Amino acid sequence: MKSFRKELFVNLPTRRGFINLTPQVEVCLRESRIQEGLCLVNPMHITASVFINDNESGLHHDYEVFLEKIAPHAPINQYRHNDTGEDNADAHIKRQLMGREVVVAVTEGRLDFGTWEQIFYAEFDGRRRKRVLVKIIGE
């Protein structure tokens, strides 16, 4: 069995946003030369998420509205975590709701997606450089 590891870097200029990582993950898969296996994609930060869904701007807007209703950023004093001097408690909660990582099957050297599926990075406390781990194992 082979193993491949690569870190991708993201830096959103805004506090929140979504990035389609599918093209970068496909490059990693080609570099790995793995034909059959599994591909893990994981944000290496506790205020970000990776998820799979449709690449449709209306859906991303709906996520933003939904998450802000469930865990609004302001007022920041509503969260005990922010008593430490932070202002990102909502980002931790949003990450928990959206999930930590995704695993995609690799079949015949390709990501084995369903119709419309793509991999997205969700940032909830941006404005600085963050890492995303791509780990591929297989034959």
Image (spheres, helix red, strand yellow):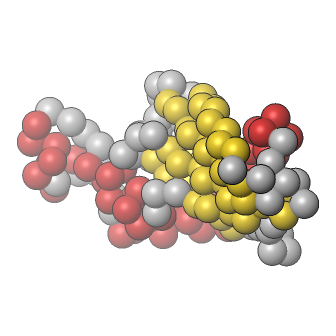
Q: Residue at x 14, y 33 (%)?
A: 85
In percent of width and height, residue 14 lies at 52, 34
State which quadrant residue 69 falls in.
Answer: bottom left
In percent of width and height, residue 27 lies at 82, 38
Q: Is residue 68 visible?
A: no
- Outermost residue, right side: 108
Give above or below for 22 relative to 9. Answer: below
In percent of width and height, residue 83 lies at 9, 42
Q: Residue at x 47, y 25 (%)?
A: 128
- Outermost residue, top side: 129
State which quadrant residue 97 falls in.
Answer: bottom left
**Residue closest to the eye, 119 or 30:** 30
Q: Is residue 40 left or right of residue 129?
A: right
- Outermost residue, front side: 1
Q: Residue at x 41, y 40 (%)?
A: 45
Give above or below for 38 relative to 10. Answer: below
Q: Is residue 4 visible?
A: yes
Q: Is residue 89 left or right of residue 16?
A: left
Q: Residue at x 48, y 64 (%)?
A: 98
Q: Please state the total of marks drawn on the protein image.
A: 0
**Residue closest to the eye, 129 or 100:** 100
- Outermost residue, bottom side: 115
Q: Is residue 89 left or right of residue 37?
A: left
Give above or below for 47 relative to 103. Answer: above
